[in-house]
Image (cartoon, helix red, strand yellow):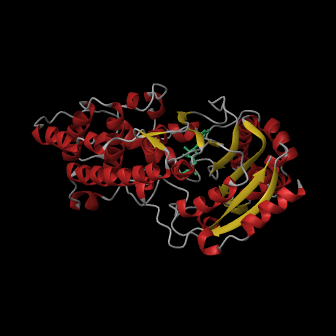
Amino acid sequence: MAQVVQEIIDCFNNFNSDVLNGINHNRRDFAHSLFQYPAMMVPSVQEPILKAILNLLPSDPWLIDPYMGSATSFVTAMKYGFNMYGQDINPLSLLIGQVKTGPYLQDSEYRLGEVYNRIKQDTKSKIEVSFSNIDKWFEHDVQIELSKIKRSISLEKKRHFRKFLWVAFAETIRLSSNDRTSTFKLHIRSKEEIEYRKISPIKLFLEISNRNMRDLSKYKIVLDDCGWLKKGKYTNNVTLRLGDSAKKIRSRAKFDLLFTSPPYGDNNTTVTYGQYSYLPLQWINLNDIDSAVSQDCLKTTHEIDRRSLGGRAYRDVSNIKERLFFVSRELKNFYCSFSLEKQKKINKILYFFNDLDRSIKNVVHSLNEDAFLIFTIGNRHGGGKELYNTLILKEILEAYGIKLMVDLKRDIQGKRMPSRNNISNTMKRENVLIFRR
Ligand SMILES: C[S@@+](CC[C@H](N)C(=O)[O-])C[C@H]1O[C@@H](n2cnc3c(N)ncnc32)[C@H](O)[C@@H]1O
């Protein structure tokens, strides 16, 4: 054991800080460029770590990402032939992941010309969707153009091509709505700005779908060159599902590596992945993503965030306190440093760690003996004080017999994080924590 530990420490201590800090990183390369999901991991940082750990894993390894987001970990891991399973609570994350991980279309199957022709020939002005406040979020002309695109995509016969088109459509919707793109929360632009803007969703859709096609084709060549594709399909296992990791891991496989970046807190006070996805999901045919996706997740702008880790209040706080404070001295000290009145206001933090703990318990059950766990996570602020997510995670994992081996610190360069809220101060740095079971 001591020798393995030394091997791991040696392997990662040689890491160049420029690589870790993501200097010269480019998140828009190939498949990573499809839809800029919030708080994406940085591939140029993840790749050398994944490559190094590969030497320490059994052959034909299995990787799990229980909070997969836009499947950044998988796009990188596919180059090394991992078998992979991922799940996320957000249907948009599932859609993006499905398109990024294939099956990949042949160049001739991207019949974009036919899709565009149908849009051009469509003279209807019927609006295809209706939801509360649609007129607040989309100008009437924009709704008409988006409806033409939606009708054209729906007429496409091949489901996988439709999924590709929905991803390009999702980005088009974000860019042509009246929501400010500078924040992840839904936040309306000023009246003057809305009047002044000249947006053509159809033009945007043409540009985005062409760019996505080029990027996916380039990524397909990379995978082909590595020998991991047969008839456009990844030769190893890749399964992605909609799932709440705090409830269940929806795979029976046993994993050698967990490779992930979890949420840093409940979505409402950290990154509102659900609000960010709300408008695109209103326009997409949800059945095309997965039969498990239902319209219920859009009943309010906050519903996906409410279903995410820490989004729901627990009735019996004393029960969860008992367990969490037993496991994490850091969390206990943090919580107890507030007055009784203030403690009530930060109970959300307990809900989040309780859900995180539940999800970790589920994941640990699906790990092989000797499995590695790599978390990219940063600290945040809570109740005006610094909250050491990294230490709390370490203590939670210790309770499951999982030990921290290496702690790599990195400066965040271009990761899309909220810039103007109470967690920003501590979001300039994050850690890559390498654990072993
Ligand atoms: C930091 S992001 C992951 C980013 C991802 N690694 C990437 O590079 O795109 C965290 C993800 O956790 C997901 N999440 C939150 N609660 C969840 C839950 N209960 N079960 C599964 N996923 C959840 C969010 O929807 C979000 O996509």
Place of residue 92 in the rendered image (x, y in percent of width and height, measured from the top left): 45, 41
Depth check: give the residue in front, 217 or 183.
217
Q: In front: 387, or 408?
A: 408
Q: Quadrant of residue 387?
A: bottom right
Q: Residue 382: horizontal and vertical position, in percent?
A: 68, 57
Location of residue 398 in the rendering, given as x and y in whole percent from the top left corner:
84, 48
- One can see residue 35 in this view: no
The one of 431 and 255 positioned closer to us in this rendering: 255
What residue is rendered at 75% in x and 63% in y? 407
Residue 345 visible to an observer of this rendering: yes
Above or below, 266 relative to 248: below
Residue pictured at 69% horizontal, 67% vertical? 409
Residue at the image point whose x is 49% and y is 43% from the top: 274
Q: Could you tell me residue 291's position as x and y percent?
A: 45, 25
Q: Quadrant of ligand 1?
A: top right
Left or right, 303 with reference to 199: right
Q: Is residue 138 above or below residue 22?
A: above
Q: Is residue 91 left or right of residue 246?
A: left
Q: Nearer the viewer, residue 6 or 356?
A: 6
Residue for point 50% across, 72% down:
24
Q: Residue furthest top?
A: 291
In the image, residue 60 sits, relative to residue 427, either above or below, namely above
